[in-house]
Every structure is written in C-alpha cells, then in structure tokens.
Image (spheres, rainbow, N blue to C red):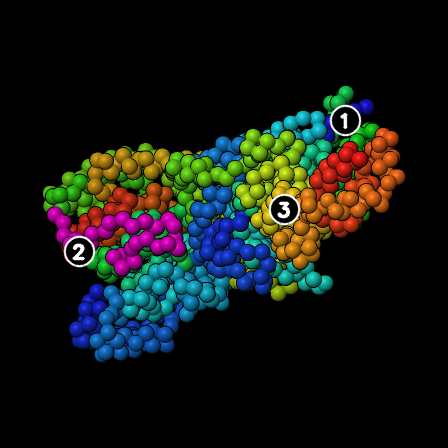
Amino acid sequence: MDILELKAREIRHKIINKEISARDVVDAYIEHIEYVDNDINAYITVDKEGARAQADKIDEKLANGEPLGRLVGIPIAIKDNIVTKDMKTTCGSKMLENYMSPFDATVVEIIKKEDGIIIGKTNMDEFAMGSSTEKSYFGPTKNPLDLNRVPGGSSGGSAAAVASKQAAIALGSDSGGSVRQPASFCGLVGLKASYGRISRYGLIALANTLDTIGILAKDTEDAAFMLSVLAGYDEKDPTTVDMPLELDNLDMDLKDVKVGIPKELFELEMEDIVRENIEKIIQLIKDKGGRVEELSLPNLKYAYESYLILLSAEASGNLARYDGLRYGHRAKEYKSLDELYIKSRTEAFGDEVKRRIMLGTHVLREGNREEYYLQALKVRSLIIKDFEEAFKKVDLLISPTSPSLPFNLASKVKNPKEMYEADLFTVPVNLAGLTAISVPLYNDITLPIGLQIIGDKFREEDVLKFGLAIERLVK
Amino acid sequence: MSYKTIVGLEIHVELMTKTKIFCNCANEFGGEANSHCCPVCLGLPGAIPRLNKRVLEYAIKAGIAFNSDISKFIKMDRKNYFYADLVKGYQTSQDDTPICSGGYIELELDEGVKKIGLNRIHIEEDTGKSVHTEDETLLDYNRAGVPLIEIVTKPEINSGEEARVFLERLKATLEYIEVSDCKMEEGSLRCDVNVNVVDRETGQKTNITEIKNLNSFRSVARAIDYEVDRHIDLLKKGQNTEKETRRWDEVNGETVVMREKGDASDYRYALEGDIPPFTLDDAFIEEIRKSMPELPHEKKARFMDQYDLNDYDAGVLTATRDLANFYEETVKYIDDAKLVSNWIMGDVLRGLKDEDLEIDSLKFDAKALADLLTLVKEDKINNNTAKKVLREMFETGKDPNSIVKERGLIQISDEGALEGIVEEVLAENEQSIIDYKNGKDRALGFLVGQVMKKTRGKANPQLVNKLILEKINNM
C-alpha cells in the first residue's frame, strides 16, 4: 500500500483499523517532502518534530483505547496566513518573516482537537495578493504537474502540496478565487465555503468581507469530509452562523438538477481549450438528463472592477497595522516615527502589496470615495440580487474556474492586469458570499481544467453533490 | 463694536462597561502597563472584533437622556490614520451612521433656560497611551479598545461659562444614567473645543480654532475666554485667526499653537468588514427606554412636587445622583422633608465643602442624619447642640445617639427640672426683670441665655422662654 496515495478519509480509517500507524503516515510524508519540495517549494515551514510528536500521541491514544478525533492522523498543510502558535506565520511576506502568533486560529484548534496532524505551512502570494504564488517573499511555488508552470494562487503552496502528495489535504484562503483557481491549475478539488460557514478567526485578513477559508482536496468526498469538521458557529468570529449541513449522502442524479449558465461569464475571454472542455461537460450533463439553461446576471459585468476596489480598500486598512512598532519587520535606522513607518513598510512589502495599498488608499480618498468605493458597494448589492434571482430559477451555476490553463512561470508577473484577469470567473462568488467548488476536468493535453460550480449561500451540499457527480462522470 | 462667541464641543466619554468594546478584556483604569490586552484589542493578525452589546445599550441610554433620535441601524466604520497608540492603523468608529442623532441639553442660566443642540453621539474604541520619558516613548495599550461615545454639539454655546455649565449638566446626566464616571482627571471625559467669533455689525467671522489638552471644566471656560479675546483683538487689528489646533497651557493660562490645519486629515472612512451592519430590534431599544433611571430634571420636578421644595432647593438637592439619593434616603427615616432639606442644604453641604469631600465619602449614612434630626424634632436636643453633634459625626462617623448620650447632651424639656433653675436665674437678675417690664425685649434673651448657660445648653430654649415669661408675668 502506498500511504501517499490514500485519500484523507482513508488514512483515518486505516489508522483506526490499525492497518497503519499515524507515525507510519507522518514518516512517509516527511520523507516525501524532503525528496520533492526543493523542486516545488510548496512549504515555507515544515514541522517535522511537531508532526512526529503528534503522530506518536495519536498512536498512544489508539493503543490505550482512548477516543479519537475525526481527523486522526491526517497530514494537513495550512496556508501561511492562518495563524499557528507552534510555527511562524509569514503571509509570504518579509514583513512577517519571523512572526509567531500567540494564538491558534480556530480551524487550527479544531484540527488539533480532532487529532489531525499539521505538517507545515504553505507558500502563498504575499498577503494572499496574487494568482500565481510567484509574489511570495519565499520564492515562487511550482506546479507539480509541470514545473515550468505556476500552481495558481494565492493558495498555490497548499494546492501544490496536495497535488505533489506532500499533504493529504490542505487549507487555503479564498477572497476572490485563491482556493478554486489553484485547485483548477493543480487538478484538485477546491472548495470555497459560504461566507460565515467556517470561522475566519486566525485567518490574517486580506479583505474581511470577502475572505473565506477553503479546502484543497484530492477529491470531492475529502473536501466534504473536511468541511463537516470545520464548519460551524465560532463565538470568536461573529460573522459565522450555524446553518444546517447535510453531507452524509452525496449521491445525486443529474436528472434532478437544474443548472444555470451565466451568460455574462461565458461572454468573457477564455482559452479555446477551456471553452471546448466546458462545452463538452455541459453536453455530458445534458446527455445524463440534467437540465441546463442559459440565464443572465447583468451586473456580473461590473463584478471585477467592484471586487478590485473593495478588496484594495479593505486591504489597505488591514495592512495598516504592519507599522514596525509591535511586531514584524522594523527598519534599522530612522529619525522619526513617520520615517520608521515609511522605511519599515517600504522595505518589507513587495510590489503587489504596495500596489494594492495605493489603490485602496486612492479609492477611499475624499473626492474618490463616492465614485469608487461607495459605487462598488452599490454594485455589490446589485450582484447579490442578481444571484438571488438566479437561484430562484436554477439550483446551481457553472462556469470555468479560470479562463486559462496553468500559465508559465514569470509570464504574467510584469502585467498586473493580465494577472488580475485570472480571477474573473471566481470573484463574483466572493462578492455575494456564496459557496463554490472547482472540480477537475481532465483533457488530452494532461493539464487540468477546472469546472466551477456555484451554489447559493450555505448550499455547500448542492455543490458537493454535483461536484461528485461530475467527478464520477469524467473518470 | 459687539461680537458673538460661537463654541462647539466634542466630548469623548469612556463608558464604564465591564469589558472592552470588542473583546473580553477588563475595562479598568490603570493597572500594570499592557496587562489588560489580548489579540483582539492589540489588533494582532487574525484577530476579529466582537461588538459588546452593553456599549450599544449605554450609548442608547445617553441618547435617550439627551433627547436624541436612536438609530436602529448599526454600522461601524474604520477611520484610517497612523499613530503609535493606534494598534490597527485605524480606529473603529462610526462615520455617517451615528447611533444617536440630534438631541439637546437644557441649561439653566441666569437669563433663563437655554437649549444647546447636539449633532450626534457615536460609539468608537479608545486608543492606547503614549508615555513619554526623557529619551524614549513607551506604549501602554490597556486603554486600547475601551468603549467611548463621542458627543458633538452644535455651535450653539456662546461663552466659556455656558460651556462650563453645559459640561456640568452633561456630566451629571451621564453619572445619573450610570454610563460613565466622567472623571476628567483620569481621562474618562475629554473635551475639545471649537471656537470663533463673529462681528455682529459686519458679520465678519474669525477662522475656527480647535483647543485641546483641557483638563477641567474650568480650563474649558478659561481657554474659551482667552481665545475669544485673542480672536477679537485680531479682528480689531483687521486680521484674522489661522484655522489651527491649539493647546491649552494651564500654567500660563494661554493657548499655544499645536498644529496647523492646512492639510486637513482625510481619514478615508471605510466599512468595518468584521462587523457586518445590522438592525436592532425595537424591543431592545424599548427595554432600555423602560429601564432608564430618572433624569436630573425629572427628579428635580418630582422633588418639588413630592417634598414641597422650592425650585432652588430641589435644584441643589438633585445636582448629583448621590446627593439626591442621600436626601431621599434620609427622608425615608424621618418624615420631615423640609427639615431634612434645610439641614442638608445648610450644615451638611457646608461641612462637605469645608473638608472638600463628596457626598459618597461621608463617614455617616442617611440613617444617622435622620437619627440626629429626629432628636431635634422630638426636642431632645436643640439646634445648636445638633450642629455640634453633626460636626462630630463628620469627624468620627459616630452615631448621633451615642454622641448625645456620651456627652450628656439630651435637652431638658421637663418643666419641673427647669423650674428651679429658672427661679434661680430670676433671683440673680432682678435688674433684667425690671428692664423687661420697662419694654426692653432684649432682657428676656439675656435671661434665657443664663438658663441655657446653667444647663450647659441642654435646656429646651422654647420651654425656658415660656417659663420665664410665666414667672415674670406672675410677679
């Protein structure tokens, strides 16, 4: 048996049945990480000792017949913008190069409590700003399917870790597509939960109204399994809610589902191969008796600009706390408080971070605020209404996750606008706080294409069921 | 020439909730530096604020007390600026949707009642404190996240004295409704002043000066008077003031330039994404309305009615909640509202003033005062004796009955006991009897005094008076 091939839920099962030990699992993963990660650079930090200690603890519990948690022995990678007490949390930035959080994120607490094994912290675009994981202070992550290509981003480290079998499952964050797009690029399932489904406490904020924690998994059932453990109200994050989540049976007959094709998304530019494959899957769904209809969400045309304005505005505020005073990078020499701020931030933030801070500052300035920020908030309400209308007519919406195949390393870093366009299909979901999943559609050139399935808020079971049906259909 | 003074105030009041506005840290003044802090009030990466319901309740109480409109819609905003005492690079406050709008406070001035309008009351978090030593600045974040309300008046105050009376009224009310202790010396009430003057004839206005660093209501009045003179002098010289912020220098009794306002700050207000806007239930506000304690003016009206007090006395007795409570408590034990009011307005307040004490630091309670006044009322001691006993109560806190007993001060109201002494005195002072009979009324006072002297003040003077007259008339 190859441990690295096991799905997350299978690892748990095999440990509980004593077919393998937790230590076996961790040793196999660490050996593999040591072997491959020099080439891939999925991890910023790997906690070998911590992972081994946790594995031994689990094996001991098992030997003593003590009750075990739901994530027993599963090696989990965590994006480096989710805080951990035991490992530094860098956000892929020089600013937090050595930052140790005094507390664990709620999801980390849950994983520990449920006997999961946090094996390391993964690379990411600095402060989650990017779509290729090339904007990390710790160097780019490479796509395990083709080392000349990017893994997507900003959760590219988490995606690459799972795709290269350096973790059984991983957590990322998704504020505009940062889980779904890397899932698409690395041939994984990427689940973005509804805003409020998984606690954000301990997720370092990029844009508070858009940020969600997401799951990168080998298949839909693993994603569903992880979601069932992480979901729920957390008093530390008042934006969470306890909404019903029924994931025990994910079987679905495609005949029972009504799928919408948002006209505005299909009018966007996309690579021919993407369009062909998406059209092929739509035909397949129809062939299986699924009802598919085109519909219009007119305000999606303005989604991207609104998203960029709101994200930048919120980010410029969120990143103001990194001033070099209490933690994080501080310039060595300064003559005044202002100089301390300016030098520390100039030295420690990368270009993309600076660009978005400037953009966010610009759209909030007096004289611009009305025209940009407040206008974007209005558009956001309209987009939410468009989705509400759409979900009165259909159960789900589908589109490509990304307009392109994984692109080559360094091919877009010089052109921010082109890079931003990688998120065109994913950002509307964040604006409306919905749930969505990206499932891989394989094609004849071996690089994966992701199908995005969008569900209504708190309808994770719908997207997971449909995702599983697609998975079965394409295999 | 005549000038009109125009003053508006901005008052920050710390609310005395048990915990801070967004976390469970204790809201206490002082304490070891940085000991009342947690990831939330320190704004650490990944922390999420939770709005304290009590803060809404207290702010609404203040709004009700000041006749404001209460907004059911609650939205928090970020006010962006950099400063060392500001942990997040923004202060979470309210921009365009203050919890309370409008309202007024009525002032009783010599020339009559005047209403001072309020613009708004909003809630926000306090910042930390910079502690400057000779060669470094230290930061204490215990105060970071302490809840504040900011009360902004309309520019309807027309003198330093009016500002002082306004602040007294404001403080009394906030203390009455128990939302703040309003201690300017501890910074739980802070006041900034905006002042300018208008030439009544030409209509020419000076530019508004903002005054900060005001440490007492008296400084507020003095600073306004100083500024008004400065503004008028400049106008007379054909000049104008600068639009600037000045600092009050208490020692030299003058204002000095702190910073020029040329480049007005742009706070780039943005929504606080971690606290999604919400709407309060009517029931929540109604509950607060129902539980509102009696306000100063209501209490005053009731005192006039219930205890038959005149306007002035009722005003004095209800000036603070503690004094009013002390009065009512005393009246509970002795059913003579007028007697109690005379004594509290007289000797009790005088005693407090002499020793520079507040009513709550008295060594005796209302029951003790009532006991003392009962002795007076039952003619067991006379007024002069009672004053002496009260002084001893101020010093030792002993109960009046014990004092009277220990010192043998019980008034002699027994005719039989006094008769002998009266006869003795008359026998010794024949000349006075003749004088009295010749129409010199003063002689009677002398005779009474002699009896009092022989009884060491214990005789009931009215009774002595009566007995002497009877004897003389029978002679």
Residue B213 place in picture, x, y as percent = 69, 47
* Residue type, numbered disc 1: Tyr
Residue A136 place in picture, x, y as percent = 44, 60
Q: Is residue A306 visible?
A: no
| Residue B375, disc | 3
Which of discs 2 and 1 lies nearer the camera? The answer is 1
* Residue type, numbered disc 3: Leu
Residue under the image location 43 percent in, 64 percent down: A103
Chain containing the residue with disc 2 = A
What residue is disc 1 on?
Answer: B3
Q: Quadrant of the N terminus of chain B?
A: top right
Residue under the image location 28 percent in, 37 percent down: A388
Chain containing the residue with disc 3 = B
Residue under the image location 31 percent in, 45 percent down: A434
Residue B108 place in picture, x, y as percent = 65, 31
Residue A217 lies in the magenta-colored region? no
Relative to residue B236, is residue B360 depicted above or below? below
